[in-house]
Every structure is written in C-alpha cells, then in structure tokens.
Amino acid sequence: MPLSGGRVLLEGVDVSRLSIAERIDNGLVLVPEDRQRDGLVQTMSVGENLSLASIKAFTKGLLTSGSRERGVIDESISSVHIKTDGPRADIGSLSGGNQQKVVIGKMLATHPRVVLLDEPSRGIDIGAKAEVFKLLAEGAASQGLAVIFSTSEVGECLSIAHRIVVMSRDASRPSSADVSKEQIMAASGESVVA
Amino acid sequence: MSNHSHAARRQGGGFDLGRMLLEGRAFFALIAIIVIFSLLSPVYFSTGNFLTMSSHVAIFGLLSIGMLLVILTGGIDLSVGSTLGLCGVVAGFLMQGVTLDAFGVTLYPPVWVVVLLTCGVGAFIGAINGVLIAYFKVPAFVATLGLLYVARGVALLMTDGLTYNNLGGDPALGNTGFDWLGFNRLFGVPVGVWVLAIVAVVTLLALARTPFGRWVYSTGGNARAAELSGVPVKRVQVSVYVLSGICAAIAGLVLSSQLTSAGPTAGTTYELTAIAGVVIGGAALTGGRGGVRGTLLGAFVIGFLSDGLVIIGVSSYWQTVFTGAVIVLAVLLNSIQYGGRRKTAAQTSATPLLPLRLRGRPRATGKAQPPSRQPSIEAV
C-alpha cells in the first residue's frame, strides 16, 4: 500500500520512509498477520527461520559464523519456548502455535524497541494464544519493549491492553484500558446487538 | 544450511534405502552412466576421455551454476545461451583490435582486458534481466526470453552472421594467450575444468557461509517473508541475474577458446541444458531448494550421457530423446522428494494445513477466520 502522508517517529527517527531492513535496525519490527504467506520461509529449517532477521548479528567480515548463529537460535528457542525437535527440523513439522512463536522469536532476536503484531492470535490454539501474550508481556516488562497489536476480537484487547485505539472509517479514537465492550463497539460505529 | 538435501533425512530418522537412493539420485545416475558406457565402449573408461568430457562439462557446469543461483530465488534465466554466444563474439571482436576512427588508431587490448570486458557484457545483460524482473515486475520467463532474442540478434549483427576464427592474437601486439583458457592444462586437467572448479567452490562458500547465500535461499523460499525479515529481496534478484550473466560470459570465453573461434550462434539452446543440469541436481524450480554439489552432478550427468551416446555411435536424434527423458525423470523424482512437504508449506490459506494439532480450534486455515473478523460480540 503506498504511503499517503504523515510521519512515524521512533526516538526521533522518521521510520516511515526507511526500508524494512533499516526499520529493523532502528528497532521497529513487524509480526505479520498471515504467517504462512508473510512470516515463514517454508523451505528453511526452524533454525534458519529464527535467524533470518538477525543475520548481521552472526556475520564476521564476509562470512557467517555457525557457532554464533547457533547461539542466536538456541536463545530464541528457549526464550519463546518453541517445542521442536531441534533447529534443523522442518518448519512444517511445528504446530501452528509454535510456528507463530518462531515468527515472533525471529523478530525478537533483532532486539527491537517496538514490536507490531498484526492479529497475533489468529489460527493458534487457546493455550498457545495465552503463552504468546505472556511472552510479550514478559518482554515488555523486562526489556522495555513496546508492544502494539491489532486484533478484531474485543475481549482479547480488553483483557491485555494498556491502551486501546479503535480505528474505524478513517478515524481513530484512543481510550484508556478501562472501557467497556459496549463503548468500543460504539466507537467503531457498530450497533451493539447483544 | 549448507546441506538442504538432508532436510528429509532429519524427519525420517532411521536408515531408508529408498530415501537414500532418491536423495543421492544424481550421484547414482552418474555412476550408472559411467558403468553402462564403460561396458558398451572400450574407450569410454579412460583418463583421456574423462578429461575431454570434463572440458565439455565445464561449459554446462558454468552455465548451470549461474542458473542455480537464479532458480534458487525462484526465477529462471533463458538468456544464458545467447549471452554465451554474444560474449564469445565480443571477445572475438576485441581480439581483432578495436579501430577508433576518430583517433585513427587500432587498439589491441591484452587478453585480461578482453576477459574483463567480456564479463562486463555478461553482467550488463544480467543486470537488464534483473532490473526488469525485480523492479518492473516482468515475469522472469518473459524478460529473459526477450533478452535471449536480443543478445542473439546483437551477436549476429556484430559479425554479420560470420565467425571470428583468428583468436590467437599476435606476439607483436602483445595480445596472445586467449587459447590458454581452452587448450592448456594445469596438472593434467584442462583449464576450463579448473575455472569451473573455482566458480563452484566460490559459489558453494557464498551459499553456505555468507548472508548473501541466506538471502538467496529465503528469497526463493518465500520472498514476502524474506522481505519482512529485512532481506533486500530486489537487490538479491538483480544480483543473481548479474552473476548468471557473468557465468555465461566465462562459459563463452572458455568455449570460444576451446573452439578457437567465436561464432554468433554458439550456445544455442544451452540455456535448456543448464536448466536440466540444475533440475537433475535436485533443485526445485519453485525456488529455495538446491545446491552446488547437486548441480555439478547434474551437469556431469548431462555431459557424460551425451558424450557417451556420441562415443557408442547413437544417432543425434536418439541423443535428444534420451536427454529429454532424463530431464523428465529428474523433475518427476524432484516432485516426489519435495511433493510431500510442499503441501505442508501451503502458500494459500485455502489449502488445509496437514500437520495440525487438533486442539482448541478445529482448523487454523483461512476458512475458520472470516467469522472472527466480523464484529460479533456474541463470540466474545
């Protein structure tokens, strides 16, 4: 989608006109909505997927370092609790929730300041959903990570968000976290049925 | 990373003869070819013949390695045969001396300058391919098909359809040495084979141990995901076509040196041989899977097969049939090897995902999603 206007400042740096690689360098990462289409490289192993966004971290001169890469991968697997046979396993062998954790772990491995998640709970089971949010909350608390996520499930944002912005018809309405479901629905312009 | 053919073995666990034969198929095919032709012809199994065949393989091998890089990113380069021809002609043209009318002088560049300029021409053609494909979104098949015609046409125009026969240079002009590439031997091995070996080792290293290699595999595996992970996908695409063009230029130099002549029709249909080598070597045409070792084996399979058929006196029509059958068989085996896993890696959310744990939600596919996108407060 082309840029229509405006700026996005992250610690004084306008990130709206940077390339994706530069945005990652500046600490802004995205966990896309459709992990099969935009998140995972299906031909690569779990480990290669996890290290894809942070190749620079284990490159010395021209060559990548295998041992340093393993360090990055092992750290990711343990920090986001991925259940896998090992870094060399096929990415297709993981469950949906673990695949989602690979996408999140890949982006967290770049040590971001702000992580954007687009519908992060989509298509994963309830246990994994809770775990994903717990991980992000821990990351936010321990590393000062800012988490912005979009969701279409009102209950989800009411239960975990500190701040809620309802975006509807070219307008956004911020509110605090202690709003009710009905207020959100009203803000989005939808009539409350139930 | 370095070995994608191990991918399936990781899953299988135990020793499996069928699996092993399938994964090592290019290697076993090469062994079978050598054994069969050695039985059929007494001259086939000799060092001399292997070296001769290897210098033929060098041409296909160089093209195949360039092609491998392109195919790994999910593209295809149909222009390499024509690029080979054009680069041979450019080298031949430069060896004849370049007359600058404005200054009234004729320049005779030394051979290393000829080699560099020729590689530059190959890189330039590759760059046009790459920019058309990456930035103008022209399908790779169409863009490189166009360049196939353009490069061939330019080669014919440059020579008016004729062939440069005098590539030897003149000691008085200081531009001798062009024959060295095709004729001389280092430690008994033709220089062309050494060139292939060097290009292969550098490519192997680049794919296995550099960020560029990782970018190439991820671009072919899933370009969107790669881009969102910070991979400079467009630059990678341009680079692989440039490298493919350079490989074709090197092949053109070696071939015209071997033939001691540079003709504008050299390398016609070689792009298909190069693709065949890559495919026989186990690379997936959809991108993301394949390697240098397999591709080299594939080039040797094609080269040793066609030379063997010549040696035992099979008509060239039958050679074409055999080559075609081998290629179809190779693609068939590739789809058996990758077919099972391709489905788990479904690109479209409409295809059900196979390895789903049936917990919580019945299905994590797109079909389960549309209801949740509605503002249905009953659900929450």
Image (cartoon, rainbow, N blue to C red):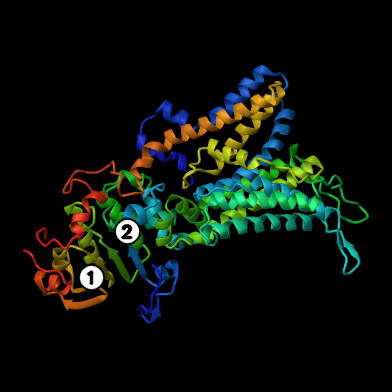
Q: Residues within 10 Å of mark 2 (few under 14, many from 20)?
A: many
Q: CA distance from mark 2 to mark 1?
A: 16 Å
**Which three-letter amino acid code belongs to the residue tagged 1?**
Ala
Picture quadrant where residue A130 is located: bottom left
Residue of label 2 = A105
Residue placed farthest to the bottom in the image?
A12
Residue B184 relative to residue B141: left or right = right
**Label 2 residue SS:** helix
- Percent across and percent down for residue B314 are 68, 22
Label placed on residue A61: none
B246 horizontally vs A47: left or right:
right
Q: Of callouts 2 and 1, which one flags the residue occurring earlier in the amino acid sequence?
A: 2
* Chain containing mark 1: A
Q: Residue at x 11, y 62 (%)?
A: B377
* Most foreground residue, B58 or B344: B344
Pinpoint residue A180: horizontal percent, then vertical percent: 9, 72
Spot occupied by residue B241 in the image (x, y as percentages of width and height): 59, 54
Instruction: Write down the chain letter for disc 2.
Output: A
Identify whether A67 is placed above or below B195: below
- Mark 1 is surrounded, within 10 Å at the Cα level, by few (under 14), some (14 to 19) or many (20 or more) other residues, namely few
Instruction: Pick the quarter of the image with the C terminus of chain B.
Output: bottom left
Does any portion of residue B87 appear in the rendered image?
Answer: no
- Side of A64 where A40 appears, left or right: left
Provide the residue designation for mark 1.
A141
The amino acid sitting under disc 2 is Gly
In front: A119, or B197?
A: A119
In the displayed structure, would residue A10 be above or below residue A34? below
Q: Residue furthest left?
A: A194
Q: Nearer the viewer, mark 2 or mark 1?
A: 2
In this rendering, would B220 be left or right of B146? left
Disc 2 with disc 1 on a shared chain: yes
Disc 1 secondary structure class? helix
